[in-house]
Image (spheres, rainbow, N blue to C red):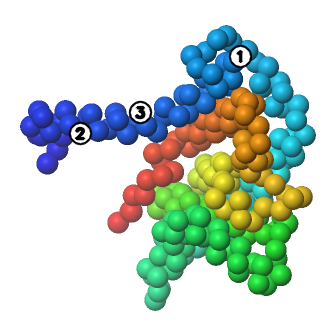
Amino acid sequence: MSTASMPNWRRLTLTAVTFAILFFLFFPIAVTILVSFNSSGFLLPPQGFTLDWYAQAWDMDEFKRGILVSFLLGVAAAAVANALAFPMALALVRYDFPGKAALNLFVMSPLLIPTTILGLALYVFLVRIGWGGGFVTLLVGHVMMVIPFAVRILTASLAIFDRSLEEAARNAGASAFRAFVSVSLPILKTGFIASMMICFIISWNDFAISIFLASPGWTPLPIQIYSHIQFQYDAISAAVVSSVILLSFLAIVAIDRIAGLRTVMTRRDRR
């Protein structure tokens, strides 16, 4: 039954529930941003406007190190995840083989497991094999977390790609590899860019995996923020979080402008 054909009371109830969910999702974000500009910090209502919290936040070495670690980790996780995801997406879209459904389920399985449980399991496993900390440990955890998103986006991009363009290149004398590199990849680049950026954002904002795998020398920004909140009651952490929210929002807007979120997140199978 469509929304238009619903009775008025059901439509109003659905609308009210939808707005209530949106309110509970965005209200904490709005309060955090408000506090970051409040001269009295966490004391509400606001007493005045200030940018001092931002100045103090970005002058602290712990946050600078956290930004650097999160940036390096996000770039590396996005690159490795997409390098692994592309051949899997190619196999899932273009070929039929025994165990195809099982492979798809295995790749997407990290999405079915709570990230806290996944982080703890990874920590126990990596410690047992001698990888108790460091950048590589974090990278393994972040790649495992973001690879389902990379496979999903690249699968969608490959599914809507017109393979007749490759066939035309083959008919013109190009080899299968040359046709794929010269024709397919340039067209699929928007999907790659979107996948890289989304994987980077997810890695950049991750807390549940990093809290188990971070080490003193490699502590991502979300863990630095958590450590600061534990011992300091000020709005510096709110300023850092607001900056991260702004950067994530700008990245999402960039993805939408470059490729279109509907295009890269929706799969349309060609018959």
Q: Which mark is residue 23?
A: 3
Is the residue under label 1 in contact with that under label 2 (CB below 8 Å)? no
Q: Residue at x 70, y 78 (%)?
A: 124
Question: For the C terminus, which image quadrant?
Answer: bottom left
Q: Which mark is residue 14?
A: 2
Question: Is 104 displayed left or right of 240 in the figure?
Answer: left
Residue nearest the viewer, comparing 128 with 111: 128
Question: Is 69 displayed left or right of 225 in the figure?
Answer: right
Q: Secondary structure at mark 2?
A: helix
Q: Which mark is residue 39?
A: 1
Is the residue under label 1 in contact with that under label 3 (CB below 8 Å)? no
Q: Secondary structure at mark 1?
A: loop
Label 3 vs label 1: CA separation?
25 Å
Residue nearest the viewer, comparing 4 with 69: 69
In the rendered structure, which amino acid carries the disc numbered 1? Ser
Instruction: From the top left corner, tell me how far across and down residue 13 is, in percent.
Output: 20, 37
